[in-house]
Image (spheres, rainbow, N blue to C red):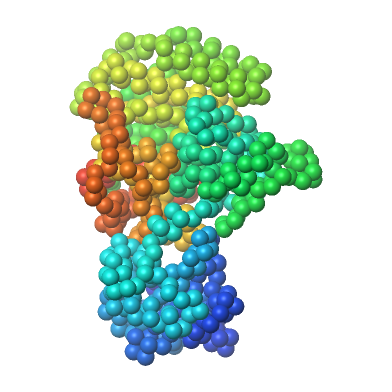
Amino acid sequence: MLKHLVFLMLVGLVVGNARPAHATETKAYVRAIPDAKTWKTYSKIVATDELGKFIIDVKTNDIYFFDVNLFNIHADFVLGVLLKKAWTADNIREYNKNYEKVKPRFILCYLTHHLKVDRWSFSFWEGDKIGADDVMRVSKRIEEAFFIKHLPFRPDSTMQQKVANEVVKRGLTSVTNDEIYKSAEYQAFTRGKAVGKLKVVPIGTPYEKATFDRGDIVLLQESYPDITPVAGILASAFSTPLSHVNLRANAWGIPNAGDKKAREKYGKLDGKVVYYEVNDTSMVLREATAAEITELANRVIAARHIDLPTADLTSPRLAMLTRQRAKDVVRYGTKASNLGEIVTANLPGVRVPAGFGVPFYYYVQHMKQHGLDAKVEAVLTDKRFATDTVWRKAALDGLRKAITDAPVDPATLDLIYKRVRLKLGGKGVFVRSSTNSEDLPGFNGAGLYDTVGNVVGKKELGEALKVVWASLWNLRAVDERSAFGIDHHQVFAAVLVQVGVNATAAGVLVTKNLWDTTDDHSFTINSKWGLGERVVQGQKVPEQIIFDPTNDGTKIISRSDDGVMLVFDETGGTKEIPVPEGSGVILTEARAKKLSAMVTAFLPVFTHGHPLDVEWVLEGEEFWIVQARPFVGG
């Protein structure tokens, strides 16, 4: 509550000074909202919700529906209009007591019309310690003064969920954010407009067989772990903004949405050139007009160009993360050097699994030793490379097979395996990509390259190295780099070899609120039980929360619906097992606070000015950071 006090003081001093002097003269509040017209006057739309706020005076039972277009926060209205007090530290401290369980003067409430599902709810700030009696009191008062009846209580935190369980026993209905999120037939992930040919991907199409052209607007009927560049995405199975497909669409700036009835509504347009527009609460998909098609044909797409760090191909040193800094990106790639920057900052409480970099030198050695560099050149210079997706995919498949079939130089493998035994204790390791074309401002390359988990043994290590090297030539990686104007001749693969953490849970944290662009303080955190691959693949809904480190507020968006988890196999590699019964909540408030504090501690290490996209794992109750990169997108 002290953090909330400080935050509120700062916000209040700004908002309070901007408060309209004529607020009380223009009906700053009403005592009842009898109809939809009045509601429209006193509410506002934020993203996919229509929001209103009200206050109940616990002494008089008076209710005040105030104009949220004039007053951004409850405190602004309470101090400026009801109490007519200045924004002082003492007054704010007194006001903040209204968030405790025992309310000295006011109950501070929210009304929400969830537009995507056309449902209503009332709620409280997620840090409010409101008790069951006051929730029942609010429900009764709304029933008397609001035109929509029988509103359910919507708990926004784990603490409030316990209160919801109690009031339900007393006859009040409740609805969770999880229920609202999963019941929505429509979800906008990236807003925008596009014209392109609609391609409906048949159910059962394997991910490896799915190929797309840059001008396609694709209708996906199943969840895919990734996708090559397209003009727009519409999915009938969707989960989270942080899946690789949705991150990719965000980075490309293309319209991207989910609609559970997409095939039923739009399947007849398969193969036609369509106009596609995505907004927060609705979308348009129809045949494009002649004018729109002409505009597309004549449109000059501005070439995007990403400058890659120049690669140093001469250094054979296997450097530990403790010996790497950001400048070492030229030898060890961005993933390893970013983690090295965190490790060498030596920040209390920040944990990164031990590891070392296998520099570009060894990839180049492998390619030259077996004549694979000539094969790369032959693919890149073939006239079909830029125009024929089917040919390009087949050629890249053949190139990757040649890379993995060729044996790793025995002396090189001995050297790398020796380091695993001596420096990493011979434990199972993760063999991860760390190229010079990922984790960059403007190009994060999430999911483009491969990781091999829980690698045990020298032979297995050699095979894993080749898989990661070969993944430089994944179709999705090549097409993504082409879309950003990256010269494939300048791209090289280093490898990060890191002690494997057999995670209790894992996930992604982005240091911004992806659900509310007006919130400058909160983090978005996704998680699932087990290892982290199932989070970013986006094939099941993860647990999603918004956590505000300034006041320890936790808002639940959804709970995980994944019944299986990925864990280490005792003999090496990974396996799926059922999530144990009664596993409960992953991101408790205590865990979310601990993770957010860790990320906040190393935020100053990165000076690129972008929000961070952080991958983490949870082992017991301890967090480990396994990747940090710029978040690319809106």
Q: Measuring 53% from the left and 53% from the top, which residue is drawn there? A: 186
- Residue 483 position (above or below residue 95): above
x, y percent for residue 108: 39, 77
> Residue shown at 35%/60% (left/top)?
554
In the image as oriented, which residue stretches furthest toward the bottom?
60
Q: Nearer the viewer, residue 507 or 318?
A: 507
User: Residue shown at 35%/27% (left/top)?
Assistant: 452
**Depth check: 57 or 375 in front?**
57
Q: Which quarter of the figure has residue 25?
A: bottom right
Snapshot quadrant of residue 296: top right
407 sits left or right of 245 in the view: left
- Residue appearing at x 35%, y 44% in the figure: 562
Q: Is residue 162 visible?
A: yes
Task: State the residue in front, 574 or 97.
Answer: 574
Q: Whole-percent x and y of residue 497?
A: 32, 28
Which image quarter is the N terminus in? bottom left
Residue 577, placed above or below residue 240: above
In the rendering, at what x and y percent does residue 609 appear? 48, 49
Please identify the quarter of the rendering in which residue 333 is found.
top left
Q: Position of residue 421 (x, y in %)?
A: 22, 22
In the picture shown, does residue 89 fall above or below 165?
below
